[in-house]
Image (spheres, grey):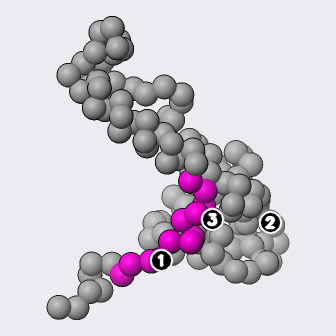
Amino acid sequence: MHLAQSGSDEPVRAAELAEAAEVPPNYMGKILHSLVRAGILRSVRGKLGGFELAIPADQLSLRQIVSQFDDLREGRKCLLGRDVCSDDDPCPTHERWGQVSERIDEFFGTTTVADLMDQPRKPAKDSIRR
């Protein structure tokens, strides 16, 4: 989101991204390089280097990003961890989890980074005064 919202034609430095995400810089570096290897980001070397989106925000689905770090393979997993969980041999959560799982899968597949940028930001709970 930070890269897409930067509003600059210049790459964004890893340190700035780490600060924005509130994660250690070395952890952010690993994340960024994973996304570069996946073709989601582009790394620019040099004094003015950094990272930029390799895919336009309106074409970059959340599934493309999240699948680099979490197993989002087709088909859902049993919520209770059973190896075999199907309509023929369902676990107690099968029907209800199936409905939720399908909605989650649809969300990650159809929501783009640009879609999230269009959402108004709400203040964090800590910043709300009573």
> Which one is earlier in the sequence, the residue at label 3 or at label 1?
3
What residue did someone put label 1 on?
Answer: 120
For residue 13, which quarter of the picture? Answer: bottom right
Front one among 102 and 14: 102
| In-image side of 96 versus 58 (left or right) | left
Magenta residues (range): 111-123
Q: Residue at x 36, y 30 (%)?
A: 98
Q: Furthest-left residue in view?
A: 130
User: Alpha carbon of mark 3 to alpha carbon of mark 1: how far?
Assistant: 12 Å
What residue did someone put label 2 on?
Answer: 44
User: Alpha carbon of mark 1 to alpha carbon of mark 2: how far?
Assistant: 31 Å
Q: Residue at x 74, y 81 (%)?
A: 8
Q: Quick one: quadrant of the C terminus? A: bottom left
Q: Furthest-top residue in view?
A: 88
What residue did someone put label 3 on?
Answer: 114
Relative image position of residue 107 (x, y in whole percent) = 49, 48
> Is residue 65 something one can see in this rendering?
no
Q: Is residue 113 magenta?
A: yes
Q: Residue at x 48, y 25 (%)?
A: 75
Q: Assess whether mark 2 and mark 3 are in contact (beta carbons under 8 angstroms).
A: no
Relative image position of residue 67 (x, y in whole percent) = 56, 41
User: Alpha carbon of mark 3 to alpha carbon of mark 2: how far?
Assistant: 22 Å
> As displayed, is residue 17 above or below residue 28?
below
Front one among 16 and 67: 67
Relative image position of residue 65 (x, y in whole percent) = 59, 50
Front one among 95 and 85: 95
For residue 56, which quarter of the picture? Answer: bottom right
Front one among 66 and 94: 94
Q: Number of callouts in the render?
A: 3
Which residue type carries mark 1? Pro
Relative image position of residue 43 (x, y in whole percent) = 76, 61
Q: Quick one: quadrant of the N terminus? A: bottom right
